[in-house]
Each structure stands twice: as structure tokens, then as C-alpha cells.
Amino acid sequence: MAARALNPIIRTILQRLGLGLVTLLVVSVIIFSAVTMLPGDFAKAILGQSATPETVAAFQKEVGLDQPPVQRYFEWIGGVLQGDFGSSYSNRVGYTRTVVSMIRPRLENTLFLAGMTALIAVPLALVLGMLAALYRNSWYDRLVNLVTLTSISSPEFFVAYILMLFLAVRLPIFYALASVDADTPFWERVSRCALPAMTLVLVIVAHMMRMTRAAIINLLASPYIEMARLKGLSPSKIIYHHALPNAWAPIATVIAVNLAYLVVGVVVVEVVFVYPGIGQLMVDAVSKRDMPVVQACALIFATTYILLNLLADVISIVTNPRLLHPR
């Protein structure tokens, strides 16, 4: 009986994975086409306006820009499937630098910052959301809603500069700039990442907290919750044991979207705090017209977003099997 119940779940998860792969393939075509259709000559932008036509032609031949776009796409996506994102257009004097060697340390830095932020933001948002639902319309609920609405309404760079002004300039508690490298000790890295992580926590915790609160309040009107009340269970037990397990589907979705944002949308925070992450690398690559790096960063962002949404989808199905039988 258990196997029969498990099969539809596995089948649905495999269908979602297949749909995710198709989506990723379509996104790769869009990324490559968008970069290819950008105005201007990449070779002239890299070599400078003083480059001779012979030098430009030699560079185009070296990096494959003289080939048809369809052939270049299949060569690019074939390399990506083997873990090869090609070589950077810039800094090719004397040696070529692979895109993977440029992205790996930056991606590790971004994942470190995202992981540090998630460890603080997710439990904090769940606790604040459950307490807001438990004490609905109380002064606590109003205060949390006011603070979260304020943080949602404030741009990231504004929050970042306010924190930097008060916690790094006027009160020198944290580092103003989050400059780290591979040799930075772990706890010093944590200390330097404190302000960027704090900024991201303030930005994303509001969405997760409000969704948690709304999902639990919606479930509190259900008949089985009313039955639990009639049995004399305390409000905290009703939320923890009856409402929260059934609220995981919408909560998991909003958590996944916000975790994806931590990797995809940290560009502004990384630039403000001069943090050497993949977002800042992409900004630098766009300014230098280093298209292989731009394509690789965009594909990593898209993959992260699709994978985390798939994970949220799977969690929703596992925690609520009724989603297997939509009406």
C-alpha cells in the first residue's frame, strides 16, 4: 500500500524534473540569443577602437565569433554540459583564463553569504510569522507588520547604507566593506559579512514572515482547527501540531523564491559592500563586454532559480499529497 502511494509522488517529481530541464534548455537559448543580439562588436570592445581590422579578424577567429550563431550555441551548450564555460575574452595577453576559474571563487563567496543569511532569516521568519498568527491583531502583530512593511518598502541600497552609517561609521562595530579572499579565516569572514547578511535578512525576512502568518491564519479557519479548539488544545499546540504541517506548501514556495533571490539578486548588496561575489563579477563582465562570463553567470542564476523552485514544488507535493490530484 505504501509503494502504491509512493509511485504517484515519484512519477510527479520526475515530471517536474523533466519540465525543469526543458525550461533550463529554453532559458539557455534565450540567454545566448540575447547576448548575441547585443549591439556593437565584441572584438572591437575588447581590443579597443585603435585595433586594426586584421587584429579584430584574428581575435574573432580565435574566440569563434566568425562562426554562425547556431554553431556557436551548440558548441557553447555542449561545453557547458561537460563543465566547460569557455574562456574569458578579457586578459588574454599571454594566456587565456577559463570562465570556470573566474566564477568558482566568486560563486563560493556568494553561496557563503547566502547560506549565512538563510541560517538567520528562515528560522527568524518562521518564528515571527507563527507568533504574529498566534497573537493576531495584538500590539506585537501590529509592530511586526509595521517593521516588515517598512523593510519591504525600503530599497536594498538604502538599508545597506543606513546600516553602514550607524553600525560601521558612527558605531564601529562591524566592517564597512566586506572584502574577503580565499585566505580570510572563517570567523573574520563571518564578521566581514555581517552587514551584507544583515541587509539581506531585513530584505527577505519580511516576505517569508508575512507568508507564514497569512498561511497559518488561513488554516485557522478550517473545520479541523475548530475541532481542535473544541477539544481544548492550546493555541500554540494548534498552530505547531495542526496548522503549520499543512501550511508548508505556500511557506516552502516563498522560502525557495527568497533563497533563490539570495543568489540571484545580491548584485546591489555585493556592489555596495564591495563583496567579491558572482553578482559583482557579472557587473564587471558586462562593463568589459566579456560575454562568456556574462552567459555563464546568467545560466548559473537561471539554474539556481529553477532548482530551488523545483525543490519547493517537491516539498509542496510531499507535504500535501492532495496536490497530486488537482480539481
Image (tube, rainbow, N blue to C red):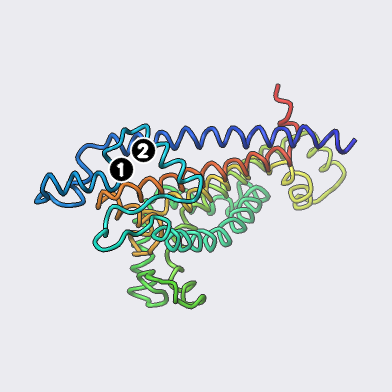
User: Dot 2 corresponds to which residue?
Assistant: 72
Quadrant location of the N terminus in the rendered image: top right
Q: Are marks 1 and 2 in contact (CB under 8 Å)?
A: yes
**Number of numbered labels in the structure image:** 2
Q: Position of residue 207 (x, y in %)?
A: 52, 47
- What residue is rendered at 68% in x and 39% in y? 316
Identify whether 170 is placed above or below 316. below
Q: Nearer the viewer, residue 194 or 291?
A: 291
Q: Residue at x 60, y 40 (%)?
A: 310
Q: Is residue 140 left or right of residue 93?
A: right
**Residue sitting at the far top:** 327
Q: Quadrant of residue 29?
A: top left
Crowding at dot 1, Cα within 10 Å, few <14 / some 14-19 / many 20+, comes out as some
The answer to whether residue 141 is left or right of residue 103 is: right
Residue 234, given in percent of the width and then of the height, sits at 80, 51
At horizontal 45% and vertical 40% (from top left) the residue drawn is 77
User: In the image, what residue type sits under mark 2?
Assistant: Arg
* Numbered label attached to residue 112: none
Displayed quadrant of residue 178: bottom left
Q: At numbered mark 2, what does the secondary structure look like: helix, strand or loop?
A: helix
Which residue bears the numbered disc 1? 64
Q: Earlier in the sequence, mark 1 or mark 2?
A: 1
Q: Which of these two is toward me, 152 or 251?
A: 251
Q: Is residue 153 left or right of residue 134?
A: left
Q: Quadrant of the C terminus?
A: top right
